[in-house]
Image (cartoon, helix red, strand yellow):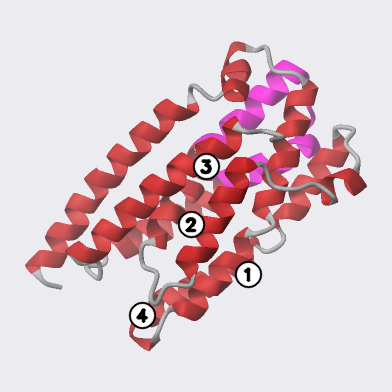
Amino acid sequence: MTTDTITASATLVDRLAAVWDEFETRLAEVPILRRLADGAVTIDDYRRLLFNLRQQVVDGSPWISRAAASFDIAHFDLRSAAIRHAEEEHRDYLMIERDYVAVGGSLAELRAGRKNLGSEALSGYMFHYADRPNPVGLLGAMFIIEGLGARRAAGWATRFQEVLGLADNQVHFMKYHQDADAEHTGNLEAIINSGAIDNAAADEIVRCAEVVARLYALQLEELDR
């Protein structure tokens, strides 16, 4: 581990924290999340949220698998981590489907749905980036997506339950991701602090985190469009 990589890792943590703070500020202005915080959210809002999330979550494991295939042998640890991650997440969309049906949604309509404007942009960006040789910057995407699950999903689930009287089996997807994504963020932190990230890679990670944070918020802003 060189002095440059130690410095890059330390600085990267602070830079990602700043990206996260900006992301949190933007999320607070998303209409459905604002209604959730205010206690004005409806069961239709919750169904719409699940409907829209499902269309993008289906793509999660495929773009992670594509990223794994893009890492060469010099990045074996990242390739292995991506393979494990893809395996762990490839059934996540099924949890959303069960939650959606449990709150009165139609499975056929859900599966026939399409991505909203933000989801199209997010998935398109992820697949495009995953095709790059050694797409180390995707660690920034994982920082945002897994961080959202670890830090916010369970709180959203609890708030939906408080406001709408939902049972645990109707918010399983969000509750599950508190623990699952906390483990993933722990793995991510280990990579960031491993000394394997130089300044160029750190710049890529931060830029990818910035883009994904904006597109994820856009996905939540553009429900049904």
Residue corresponding to mark 4: 75
The residue located at (65%, 12%) in the rendering is 39
Of the image marks 3 and 1, the number of the one nearer the N terminus: 1
Q: Dot 3 corresponds to which residue?
A: 216
Q: Residue at x 36, y 62 (%)?
A: 137
Neighbour tally class for label 1: few under 14, some 14-19, many 20 plus, Cα within 10 Å: few
Q: In front of the other: label 3 or label 1?
A: 3
Residue 161: image x %, image y %?
71, 24
Q: Name which of mark 1 and mark 2 comes first in the sequence.
A: 1
Q: Estimate how packed mark 4 is, as few (under 14), some (14 to 19) or many (20 or more) residues with alpha carbons within 10 Å.
A: some
Instruction: Using the image, tell me which numbered label, if any, was put on residue 184.
Output: 2
Of the numbered discs 3 and 2, the one sitting upstream in the chain is: 2
Residues at marks 1 and 2 touching, judged by CB atoms closer than 8 Å = no
Residue 56 position in % (x across, y down) = 65, 51
119 versus 32 height, above or below: below
Q: CA distance from mark 3 to mark 2?
A: 18 Å
Q: Secondary structure at mark 1?
A: helix
Q: CA distance from mark 4 to mark 1?
A: 19 Å
Q: Is residue 165 magenta?
A: yes
Tell me where the magenta segment starts and ends, as one range. 152-178
Compare marks 4 and 2 and give the one earlier in the sequence. Answer: 4
Specify which label sits upstream in the sequence, 4 or 1: 4
Which residue in the rendered view is the most extreme toward the bottom? 73
> In front: mark 3 or mark 2?
3
Amino acid type at mark 3: Tyr
